[in-house]
Image: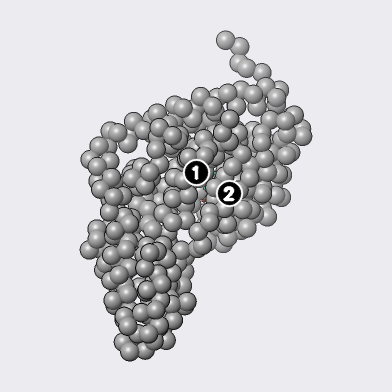
Amino acid sequence: MRQRVFSGARPTGRQHIGNYLGAIQNYVNLQEEYDCIYCIVDIHALTTLENTDRLQEDIYEMMLDWLAAGLDPQKSILFVQSHVPEVMELHTLLSMVTPLGWLLRVPTFKEKARMQPQNVNYGLVGYPVLMTADIVLYKAGVVPVGEDQLPHLELAREIVRRFNSIFGPTFPEPQPKLTSFPLVLGLNGTQKMGKTYNNYIELSATPEETLKLVMTAVTDPARRYRSDPGHPEVCNVFRLHHFFSSSRVDEIVAECRSAGIGCVDCKELLAKGINLELEAFRERRASFAARPQYVADVLSDGACRAQVIARETLAEVKEKMGLVQRPA
Ligand code: TRP
């Protein structure tokens, strides 16, 4: 039997090349070796959203990117968290074996409490319990995540151990599977690429938009004149060349160091590399976008398949916790 993978991502709308290199490509590759379940976690999103006007659109746009990148509903279960409400029941049951002290110590909780002091809601404290419920509802053993999620997974394992020791072996201890990609920096070359810093290139941008954005990227600050030799090792544009111009990296290094090419040339090359790499993706995305009913069907089918597993686990959990079924 293949091992089961579960991962969740918040609905952040159109995905950017940081999401693509850091998470989506990894999700796509895992489909070959594992039974994968990928979930857009809209309930988690509610812990930090001020309003939900864009929520449905963000889910839809993100799904278009996932499908276009190669997440395949024939191979994996793709669904939206709230469409399988059993996860909220399991969340409540798991909360009974989760000491509050564990949750208050989680670094992401402290960070969010600091970022939104006007909205330190109860759901925010329970965030990692809901995340644990996501994973164990499907008895997943492998969880592809970025490094920032390791404390959450540690907590998930502690909750699982606690549950198993009180109620008997029920859930596997979920193991993180770190993505092999290093942090992708944004165009300004200082912060992580992301919506927070407005320093990203969307996968669905046109080739012209991509070129325009790449042209704003910060390069080696020591290279002030066209004739100055460059230092690729400190240049974020060069880092991106690794991903998008991999066959020409040696040549680009040499040309940069010898001032054979300038930063403008170099960025034009990068934009070309990105546009080439994403050409097929963008075509597929447009074809999915022309069939919104298909996307809806994928999500509906995914929720049905997920729910079959979810109901089975939940029945087992309730029985073990001594909750008898309601008489018919
Ligand atoms: N907390 C994760 C994040 O912010 C998203 C998430 C929710 C998740 N449930 C999950 C990730 C389950 C892995 C498994 O990125």
Q: Are marks 2 and 1 in contact (CB under 8 Å)?
A: yes
* Residue designated by label 1: 30
Q: Residue 93 or 274: which is nearer the viewer? A: 274
Q: Percent position (x, y) of residue 67?
A: 36, 42
At x 60%, y 27%, the residue is 313
Whether residue 96 is situated above or below residue 125 in the rendered picture: above
Three-letter amino acid code of the residue under disc 1: Leu
Q: Is residue 64 left or right of residue 158?
A: left
Q: Mark 2 or 1 closer to N-term?
A: 1
Whether residue 89 is situated above or below residue 277 in the rendered picture: above
Q: Secondary structure at mark 1?
A: helix
Whether residue 78 is situated above or below residue 200 in the rendered picture: above
Q: Is residue 293 left or right of residue 251?
A: left
Three-letter amino acid code of the residue under disc 2: Lys
- Of marks 2 and 1, the one in the foreground: 1
Q: Percent position (x, y) of residue 7?
A: 52, 43
Q: Is residue 22 left or right of residue 66?
A: right
How crowded pointer 1 is (Cα within 10 Å; few <14, some 14-19, many 20+) is rated as: some
